[in-house]
Image (cartoon, helix red, strand yellow):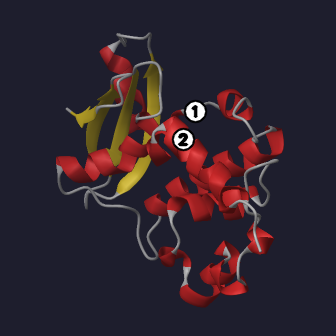
Amino acid sequence: MKEDSAAYRITDLDTAERPRERLAALGSQSLSNAELLAIILRVGVVGENAVQVGQRLLADCGGLTGLNRLSYQELCEEHGIGPAKAAQIKAAIELAHRFSLETPDARPKVHSPGDAAALVQHEMSAMEQEELWVLLLDTRNQVISIEHIYRGSLNQAQMRVAELFKAAIKRSAASVIVVHNHPSGATRSM
């Protein structure tokens, strides 16, 4: 019998209740964010299994968005997370972001300000300095590329207007969407 259910090990769980086994049997969508994070972490620390470490990390950071905002170094400093686990988490977040930008047959299309925001909000919301980017579109509003034009300070990003159009001319873009963040995490298209 378990002495303390708050400090159980993953191996103490019934096989059908373990995150990896549940993922295999039911699919990744059936797992909580903490359980998915536990699979990436693989092991916990003394007194906390990997799921509990994931729960604590998400609670301390403010969820997935907060976890994304942490720098690699800040993540390394979290209890139970060292350089290897921090790298695994950052790699998983980046893969998820890159996957969200891919489509099987075509590049992402922009039909509305919301579409443009969806393309950059994940990455821009984690930034601590203001940045100015341009989305370069072809004649069918498909994204050719997302160019990082300028990195400013905490509360401003000033640049020459010519820099906005340099990449667009070089890549023969039919349209340009300028996006700019605020360190608070808010993004908007202009």
Give how far across and how far down residue 61 sits, in percent. Answer: 52, 37
Count up the numbered dots. Answer: 2
Q: Residue at x 41, y 52 (%)?
A: 144
Q: Nearer the viewer, residue 107 or 95?
A: 95
Q: Nearer the viewer, residue 166 or 126?
A: 126
Taking the image as drawn, is residue 124 in sight?
A: yes
Quadrant where the N terminus sits is: bottom right
Mark 2 secondary-structure assignment? helix
Please tell me in which quadrant of the rendered image residue 17 appears.
bottom right
Q: Residue at x 47, y 33 (%)?
A: 126
Q: Amino acid at mark 2?
A: Leu
Q: Read off the residue under disc 2.
A: 67
Quadrant where the C terminus sits is: top left
Mark 1 secondary-structure assignment? loop
Give how far across and how far down residue 187 sits, in percent. Answer: 29, 34
Please tell me in which quadrant of the rendered image residue 101 appears.
bottom left
Please tell me in which quadrant of the rendered image residue 166 appears.
top left
Question: For mark 1, does the 10 Å Cα neighbourhood hold few (<14), some (14 to 19), or many (20 or more) residues?
Answer: some
Instruction: Give the vertical position of 168 relative to 73 (above or below).
Output: below
Q: Read off the residue under disc 1.
A: 70
The span from disc 1 to disc 2 (Cα, nearest Å) is 5 Å
Give how far across and how far down residue 42 sits, in percent. Answer: 77, 61
Q: Is residue 183 left or right of residue 8?
A: left
Instruction: Give the vertical position of 32 relative to 27 (above or below).
Output: above
> Pointers 1 and 2 in contact (CB under 8 A)?
yes
Q: Is residue 106 left or right of residue 13?
A: left
Q: Residue at x 27, y 39 (%)?
A: 177
Q: Amino acid at mark 1?
A: Leu
Give how far across and how far down residue 32 sits, in percent. Answer: 50, 65
Q: Residue at x 72, y 29 (%)?
A: 77
Q: Is residue 21 left or right of residue 115?
A: right
Q: Nearer the viewer, residue 190 or 18?
A: 18
